[in-house]
Amino acid sequence: MNAAGARTRAGRTAGAAQADPLAVDLGPLGGFIGYRLRRAQLSVLAGFELALRELGLTPGELSVLVVIARNPGLTQSDVCAALGIQRANFTPLLHALEADGLAIREVLPADRRSNALRLTAHGREVLATALALHERLEKRITACLGEAGRAQLIDLLRQLETL
Amino acid sequence: MNAAGARTRAGRTAGAAQADPLAVDLGPLGGFIGYRLRRAQLSVLAGFELALRELGLTPGELSVLVVIARNPGLTQSDVCAALGIQRANFTPLLHALEADGLAIREVLPADRRSNALRLTAHGREVLATALALHERLEKRITACLGEAGRAQLIDLLRQLETL
DNA sequence: GAGTTTAGTTATGATACATAATTACACACA
DNA sequence: TGTGTGTAATTATGTATCATAACTAAACTC
């Protein structure tokens, strides 16, 4: 509709393919699930950072806080398995939460290789705030997709995980 | 419902919350679009690497090849705008494609600050192979979601981009 | 008690994303 | 015509996330 002439931007003088972004042909890319996932995730990530900026939590950190809060006493390996995080990458993430006073590790007497994880009182407060802020983001998403669309999307994404 | 006893795996001897991964309560996390996007993208990314391993192309590189092939003569800024890539990050990506002999940059006579991008013959060959391999991945995804589900997913993800 | 497995850590490397600063060029306009 | 402003590409940096391999200490097996 606007590719060849209609609403193109002024003359742009010279050479052929300067084109405004809308005129660029993505070809088969627009049908790639992976491409669409990336673009959507970028958008949601931007929303996340906007919503939780004041708390300085990364998405990964928030997910860990949630899981520890709901399952106190889990070991690091348990949390990693539940969230699909590599244990090696989990160590610094957890240490950051600990350094911020949000979580604690206690060596399990039953197996002194393992650490039982719990939130501090402060961790629970921060989590509650984070969830409240995050709720706003989810509301924006629901406004964008509709309640049914949102549910469908979650369902489809869950199916994709088992690819 | 299975936390305390029901379908827990064997005895697991000692301490409380060892739990098998399925027993971990994700709480509200399972309803976060961002979390579901991450898990789904990890899965699709693994499929991508599996499918295109032999070519050594990253998803970003493939997307750039597609766009250049369909829009020869675009400048770097044009491609960046079309794909949502930062220009600063595009430079090394493009240079890698150039080093591999897949793409070329020619200074635009009309504006010697800009580079017109094109694929080499070899680049077109590699792209054709890559698209064929990628097609298999998309087939797997369609097998997983169904044709309708796949179309729905793309539509929903596109809506999310405009969040 | 020796050999094997497991939890956590450390080290390292790749990919993506973001921002700020710099260089070279283009353009407008007085 | 020459100066100020804007833009294309680059460079440099910093961060988040994912992956692997190697190591330590503890636990388990037999």
Image (cartoon, coloured by chain):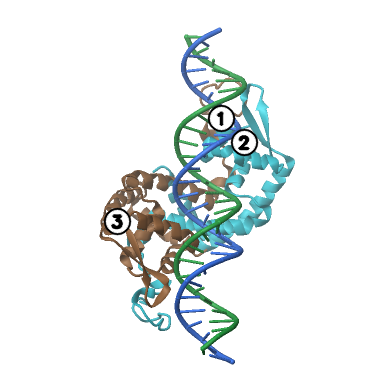
Chain colours: A cyan, B brown, C blue, D green
Q: Which percent across, then down, holds residue B23? A: 54, 34
Picture quadrant where residue B2 is located: top right
**Residue A62 or B116: which is nearer the viewer?**
B116
Disc 1 residue crowd, few under 14, some 14–19, many 20+, Cα 10 Å: some
Helix, strand or loop status at disc 2 = loop
Whether discs 3 and 1 lie on one chain: the answer is yes
The residue carrying mark 1 is B19
Label 2: chain? A
Which of disc 1 and disc 3 is earlier in sequence?
1
Disc 3 residue crowd, few under 14, some 14–19, many 20+, Cα 10 Å: many
The residue carrying mark 3 is B127
> Mark 1 is on which residue type?
Ala
Mark pair 1, 2: CA separation: 10 Å
Label 3: chain? B
Q: Can residue A140 be seen in this snapshot? A: yes
Decide if residue A72 is on the left or right side of residue D18. Answer: right
The residue carrying mark 2 is A71
Name the residue: 40% across, 83% down. Answer: A11
> Mark 3 is on which residue type?
Leu
Name the residue: 54% across, 63% down. Answer: A143
Disc 2 residue crowd, few under 14, some 14–19, many 20+, Cα 10 Å: many
Q: Nearer the viewer, mark 3 or mark 2?
A: 3
Q: Which percent across, then down, holds residue C20? A: 61, 63
Q: Nearer the viewer, mark 3 or mark 1?
A: 3
> Mark 2 is on which residue type?
Asn
Q: Which percent across, then down, holds residue C9? A: 60, 33
Picture quadrant where residue B107 is located: bottom left
